[in-house]
Amino acid sequence: MAGKFELVAAEQGGVRIRLVNGAGTILAVSGIYRDSAAAASGVREIREHAATAHIADYSSGPQP
C-alpha cells in the first residue's frame, strides 16, 4: 500500500502536513500552514524537492 500526505488541523490553528507510510506510521510532520490550500502547495514543493534532495547529517555536530 502506498504512503500518503495527510492535511490535518494544527492545535494552534492552521494546517499541518503528515507524511504517512502504507502501514499507517507517521514519518514526518510539517510546520504550520495558514490553510489547506497553502498546505497543498507545500505538498507539491515537497514532492518536487524530495526526489533529488541529499541527506545532511547534523546529528553529531552543530548545524550550519
Image: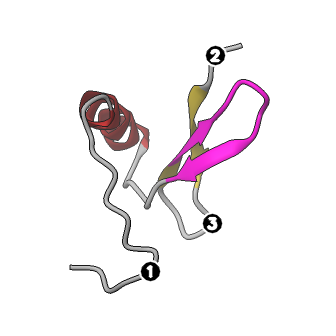
Which image quarter: residue 46?
A: top left
Of residues 40 and 44, the one nearer the viewer is: 44
Which mark is in front, 2 or 3?
A: 2
Q: Main secondary structure of the magenta part?
A: strand
Number of disc labels: 3
Give 23 or 17, whichever is nearer the viewer: 23
Q: Which residue is mark 1?
A: 60
The residue under label 3 is 11
Task: Name the amino acid, label 3.
Answer: Glu
State left or right for residue 11 relative to residue 32: right
What amino acid is found at the position of numbered circle 1 in the picture? Ser
| Residue under the image location 37 percent in, 55 percent down | 34
Residue 46, numbered circle: none
Q: Quadrant of the N terminus?
A: top right
What's the distance in space between the residues labelled 2 and 3, CA to CA? 27 Å
Q: Nearer the viewer, residue 13 or 26?
A: 26
Q: Is residue 8 left or right of residue 32?
A: right
Circle nearer the N terminus (2, 3): 2
- Asked if 33 appears above or below 24 in the picture, the reply is below
Tag in front: 1 or 2: 1
Return the mark for residue 2: 2
Chain part drawn in magenta: 17-29
Q: Is residue 26 magenta?
A: yes
Residue 28 position in % (x across, y down): 56, 50
* Residue 2 vertical placement versus 13 (above, below): above
Image point (54%, 53%), residue name: 29
Picture coordinates of residue 51, whole percent (x, y):
31, 28
Residue at disc 2, secondary structure: loop
Cα separation, mark 3 vs mark 1, equals 31 Å
